[in-house]
Every structure is written in C-alpha cells, then in structure tokens.
Image: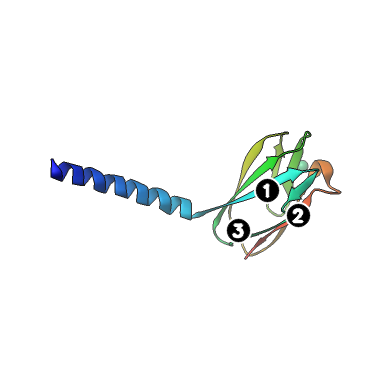
Amino acid sequence: MLKRSAAAFLALGLLVASGSANAADETVVRLTIKDHKFIPDRLEVPAKTKIVLVIKNEDAEPEEFESPKLKREKIVHPGAEIRVILGRIDPGEYPFFGEYHEATAKGVLIAK
Ligand SMILES: [Cu+2]
C-alpha cells in the first residue's frame, strides 16, 4: 500500500514537472485594443523564446492586428480575444498596426 502511493505520488510529480517546464518555455504577452489604440503600444519580449500574443478587443468595432515584419494578420472581433503565436523571433523591432484604424492603432514589439 505504501509503495503504491509512493509510486502514484512520483508519477504525479513528474506530470507537474513536465507541465511547468512547457509553461516556462512560453512567454505570454497581452495587448488590449481600446479606443482604436493598442495598449501598451510598446512591448518588450525575450528573443528566441516562444511568444504568444493574446489580443483583446474592447472596442465595439472589429480590428485587424497586422505586422508585415512578423508575417501576421488576424481579425479581432468586438469583445473577442485571440491568440497569435509568434514562435521564436530574432532580436529586433517589429512594428504592428490595426489595419482598420491605422492612424491611431499602432505599436512596436521589441525582442531583446
Ligand atoms: Cu490586413
């Protein structure tokens, strides 16, 4: 009985360990669209690490997150939240903008 619970405990420990290792490998960065602007408009992320951008649109109109340099283009519906997986990017500056409100919705992601 004691041996069995020790084995179960060890198995659970391994599951938890591998789960947290995956999470640590990923950097989640949040962007909010409000009043046709990106908040924040400047993001710093670690280079060469898996980056996941979570973009929430708090406006009543759709917006399109677009960055030719990041090769991403994705519509965010009003009230919706999307995940944009950028993968591991090289150090540098990556401008982005909202295609539907380009005059105000702009920002830059900086990988260091
Ligand atoms: Cu577009």
Q: Taking 3 as reference, is 40 above or below it?
A: below
Which amino acid type corresponds to the residue marked 1 in the rendered image? Answer: Leu
Crowding at mark 3 (Cα within 10 Å: few <14, some 14-19, many 20+):
some
Crowding at mark 2 (Cα within 10 Å: few <14, some 14-19, many 20+):
some
Crowding at mark 1 (Cα within 10 Å: few <14, some 14-19, many 20+):
some
Q: Identify the mark nearer the N-term, 3 or 2.
A: 3
Report whether 16 appears left or right of 39. left
Which coloring applies here? Answer: rainbow
Q: Which residue is mark 1?
A: 31
Label 3: which secondary element: loop
Q: Identify the mark nearer the N-term, 3 or 1.
A: 1
Which amino acid type corresponds to the residue marked 3 in the rendered image? Answer: Ile
Q: Give how far apart the Cα atoms at labels 3 and 2 are.
A: 17 Å
Q: Are marks 1 and 2 in contact (CB under 8 Å)?
A: yes
Q: Which residue is mark 3?
A: 89
Which quadrant of the rendered structure holds the N terminus?
top left
Residue furthest to the front: 2
| The disc label shown at residue 71, or none | none
| The disc label shown at residue 107, or none | 2
Seen from the viewer's position, the closer of residues 98 and 39 is 39
Which amino acid type corresponds to the residue marked 2 in the rendered image? Answer: Gly
> Of the residues tagged 3 and 1, which is closer to the observer?
1
Q: Give how far apart the Cα atoms at labels 3 and 1 are.
A: 18 Å
Q: Are marks 3 and 2 in contact (CB under 8 Å)?
A: no
Label 2: which secondary element: strand
Seen from the viewer's position, the closer of residues 22 and 66 is 22
Which quadrant of the rendered structure holds the C terminus?
bottom right
Q: Residue 66: where, in percent of width, then height? A: 74, 46
**Residue at 44% across, 51% down:** 22
Seen from the viewer's position, the closer of residues 79 and 74 is 79
Task: Determine which quarter of the picture holds residue 79.
Answer: top right
